[in-house]
Image (cartoon, rainbow, N blue to C red):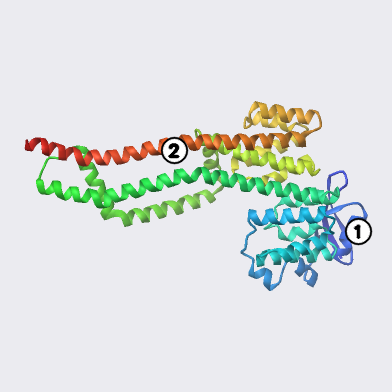
Amino acid sequence: MQFAYEALRPDGSVVTDVLEAAARGDAADALRGKGLIPLRLDESAGGGTAQEQRHAGANPAASYFQSARLNVRDMILFTRQMKMLLEAGSPLVPALEAVETQTTKPFVRVLLGRIRERVEQGDSLAVALEPESRFFDPVFRSMIAAGEATASLPQVFGRLCELAQQQQKTRKLVTGALLYPAILTGMLTVVVAILLFFVVPRFMVLFTTLNSPLPATTKLLFDVSQGLKHGWPYLLVAAGLAGAGLVLAYRSAGTRTWLDELIVRLPVVGPLVSRLIFARVVRVWAAMLRCHVPLLDTIRQSREAVSNMAFLRLIDRVEEAVSGGGRVGQALADAGIADPVIVSALRTGEENGRLAEATDFVSSWLDEDNVTTVQHVTRLAEPVLLAVMGVFVGFIAMSLFVPMFDMATAAH
């Protein structure tokens, strides 16, 4: 039986080839006997054996949880527990079994059970994770493979835990920054809706009964109120169609690229979004390089850490430059996406053979700086939103009370 494989050499390079073996486990043993760490191992022809079905997770429990997701908290718990058990000296299979037993989520228990079964049958952990690519991205699997190759799996799980924790921290930072502006925007919407749908119509009836002349702003306010009161179903339909159109347009590669580039070019928000994404990319580089993943593979796999098309093109340019013998720092400088101090730090790390330490330092510095920047933008947004709310409410109040003052003056 022939198996096509992709494996990691001791020097960190990747090799792909085909070998003969009686079973998948024998093929994995043969590769390890050659000093290789399997990254991917697939039967090159056919595949209806019971073993292959197990590797594909073809069982009722797995099918039942097919739509489940592994969230950041699940990843933090898994990597933290694995780090603790492996550092305590536990072998890999008992460690997986212990984590599987302790988890409270049924689908996570099924997932870990499938992984444990593959490891028990002779697969490396990296190969056992391959069929679960929906839950474990290439960054995760590459770091695990490198950890197995260098006998540093506990440290790798520690770095994966740090990555997940930083992702959770960034998400909470952004969510917290958006919470107060979202509350103010919601309050403004509710207040304006109450005024236009309930308060303004009453004043309209009053002024119509008195047959008094109205300023242009008051007439405009009454027209808007009547239009919303009678046409709100059409507005809801139009908003729904517009939202659906935006979603469909974003799925188009060209439109998505244009929108992603527009976001990073927006004033105030654009630089902040760029720094948040760039910090994520550099942190992934630092984690993978510290796990002895080759530089080119590190750059290539970091594509999985971002979805912004502008940054994906940046990573492509960096990969192309490094493939041609260039430097990461110079590629970032040419792209103009990083501050000069960051470029200098990465250049120094490359020249001294300490790129992993340099990326680690830069990512930590970016994370701290991003916290300050997000707080600054949030403080800037608060008075702006309050001013907008004051303008809307003030315009409505003036439009309603000015005619009343005119009538009171005319009565005297």
Q: Residue at x 30, y 51 (%)?
A: 194
Which mark is drawn over residue 239?
Answer: none
Which amino acid lies under the numbered mark 2 shown in the image of this protein? Glu
User: In the displayed image of the protein, which residue is found farthest to the right?
Assistant: 33
In this view of the protein, can residue 255 be seen by the observer? no
Residue 34 relative to residue 354: left or right: right
Q: Residue at x 30, y 41 (%)?
A: 393
- Residue for badge 1: 30
Q: Residue at x 33, y 48 (%)?
A: 191
Q: Nearest the camera: 332 or 267?
A: 267
Residue 412 relative to residue 25: left or right: left
- Image location (x, y in percent) of residue 388: 36, 38
Residue 344 relative to residue 86: left or right: left
Q: Are marks 1 and 2 in contact (CB under 8 Å)?
A: no
Residue 319 position by quadrant? top right
Residue 68 position by quadrant? bottom right
- Image location (x, y in percent) of residue 64: 64, 70
Q: Nearest the camera: 142 or 209?
A: 209
- Residue for badge 2: 382
**SS of the residue at dot 1?**
helix
In this view of the protein, can residue 104 be seen by the observer? yes
